[in-house]
Amino acid sequence: MRVLSLIFLSILMVATPVFAGVVNMRELKTIQLETTPKQITTTADGRRMYVLTEEGNLLIYNLGGELQGKLSIDPAIDQITALGPQHLLLQKTAKKQAVVAIIEVSQQVDTSKSPILGDPDAPITIAVFDDFECPYCAKTVPLLKQIVAKYPGQVKLAFKNFPLGSHRNSRNAALTALAADRQGKFWDVHDLLYENYNRLNPKKIDELAAQTGLDMEQLKKDRVDPQLSAQIAQDIEEGTNIGVRGTPTIFVNGRLLAERSLSGFSRLIEEELRKLPATPTNPQ
């Protein structure tokens, strides 16, 4: 019996792990909710937090703690699950139903200082947060131009800077393009930078800028103007606050573009055009 007990204790000692580590928790941010939550879920990409309330509302926050929107929903919904950046699974336990819904939030994107391609008075604004060394951004350039050409007078393109830290030449490229904008050559430099996105370095950037006929001495002076650095910093801060995590991130009249294709753009643009007041016709 004693032998069996010793064997049993030996098995326990082998099978039971010994935890010697100390676990600590550090609170990073407290988000003050406007009402008592029934359930909270977040998207996997970290852009949004959804709060289901006891009153039957759905609150939408960014992870900076800013309330982005509020919806009144079916009181039968008693559980929510984030399925993706914009999709939610809504559970109605009593009715034995599950509903997949898309949640769109229109963001306010400041394009007052942004270079514009197309009619500045066009009612539809495509705001693109871009990085000059991003291959996906370079691939999207022809599509963006195609869209502006497809909707003349109706769509304009606004460029927002979002140089990524992993791309060591993208910030210099952004400053060069903004400096070129002061001489009316932003889009010329923009196109050359993207055609050479994978070969950029300080010398190459200057060579490309010179090809557009810029006054290079003036460009170099403008490039070190603190106002241009401040503009880039403002774009990055704004983008971060509205959920931009990578490039390109594109908004159509503030609505996040989920599908970077001609049909994806056209769907959102046509929906926004239908919201515009009808233009009165002159009687004959």
Image: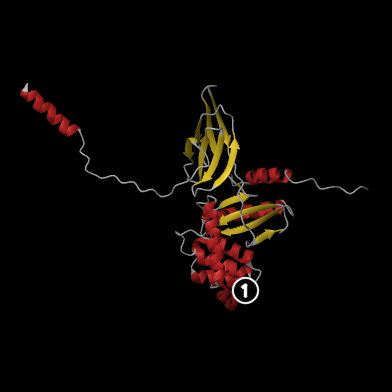
Residue type, label 1: Leu
Count the labels in the image. 1
Q: Horizontal and vertical percent for residue 121? A: 73, 57
Name the residue located 62 percent from the left edge and 76 percent from the top edge: 215
Q: Which residue is outermost to the front?
A: 35
- Image point (54%, 37%), residue name: 87
Residue 271 in percent (x, y) is at: 69, 43
Residue that lies at the very extreme toward the left in this rendered image: 2
Question: Can residue 7 be seen in the rendering of this structure?
Answer: yes
Give the colouring mode of the picture: secondary structure
Furthest residue toward bottom: 217
| Vertical comparison of 223 with 103: above or below | below
Q: Position of residue 118 (x, y in %)?
A: 70, 58
Which sits in the foreground, 194 or 6?
6
Q: Is residue 5 left or right of residue 107?
A: left
Asked which secondary structure carries label 1, the reply is loop
| 49 or 99, nearer to the observer | 49
Is residue 86 visible to the viewer in this orientation of the structure?
no
Q: Nearer the viewer, residue 183 or 13?
A: 13
Q: Relative to residue 6, is residue 140 drawn left or right?
A: right
Does 1 sit above or below residue 126? Answer: above
Which x, y percent locates residue 80? 51, 33
Q: Residue at x 68, y 54 (%)?
A: 148
Could you tell whether 47 is left or right of 10 in the image?
A: right
* Mark 1 Cα shell of 10 Å, populated few (<14), some (14-19), many (≥20): some
Q: Is residue 13 above or below residue 273?
A: above
Choose between 139 and 178: the one closer to the eye: 178
Residue position for label 1:
214
Q: Quadrant of the N terminus?
A: top left
